[in-house]
Amino acid sequence: MGINFKRIPYQDLNSRQQETYNFQKVSALLADFGYLTIRLSDDWNGADFIAQHFKTKIFLKVQLKGRLTFDKKYHDKDLYLCFRDGEGELADWYMYNHQELLDKVLAEGKLQLTKTWIEDKPYHFPILSEHMKELLKPYLISEPS
């Protein structure tokens, strides 16, 4: 008797399962761009996984997130943050150098005025505005949907 594969709705997964799911999805995507990934059992310098390019041997420390996030604790760690925007196969994946994109956002002068930022809490974007999508274009690692 064969295995009956049935897709599971992402929203039915708990947070740990969602993180594992997202790691598997982004790993498959990064492989198309010449990267292999190594999942870390415990955050190392803020990273959930390492992405290594096959040819250049570049190593990227990557923190996997459920949405666009900025956090002061990632300052000066040469850390990349990766998240998906959208559902299923139509999701867009972004991977950005935290400090590089944060500097662009801070230059606009809005983030640092928020209560969340002032209280040293992570700042999340549950929904991406058109302006933020424009800022994120250079960090898109999947084909636009």
Image (cartoon, rainbow, N blue to C red):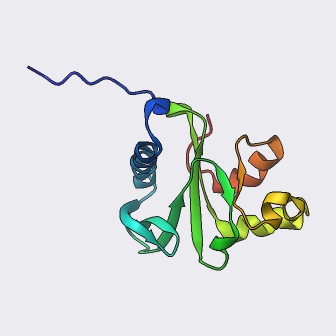
User: Is 46 rendered above or below residue 89?
Assistant: below
Instruction: Count the numbered circles shown.
Output: 0
Q: Quadrant of residue 53?
A: bottom left
- Front one among 111 and 50: 111
Residue 13 in picture, x, y percent from top left: 43, 35
- Front one among 99 and 90: 99
Q: Quadrant of the C terminus?
A: top right
Question: At 78% from the left edge and 69% from the top edge, which residue is drawn?
Answer: 103
Q: Quadrant of residue 102?
A: bottom right
- Front one among 72 and 133: 72
Question: At 71% from the left edge and 69% from the top edge, which residue is drawn?
Answer: 100
User: In this view of the protein, can residue 53 be seen by the observer?
Assistant: no
Residue 97 in picture, x, y percent from top left: 63, 67
Residue 64 in picture, x, y percent from top left: 52, 56
User: In this view of the protein, can residue 82 be seen by the observer?
Assistant: yes
Q: Quadrant of the N terminus?
A: top left
Residue 131 in picture, x, y percent from top left: 83, 47
Which residue is outermost to the left?
Answer: 1
Question: At 35% from the left edge and 65% from the top edge, which residue is drawn?
Answer: 41
Q: Is residue 112 left or right of residue 67?
A: right
Question: At 75% from the left edge and 46% from the top edge, which residue is drawn?
Answer: 133
Which residue is outermost to the front?
Answer: 119
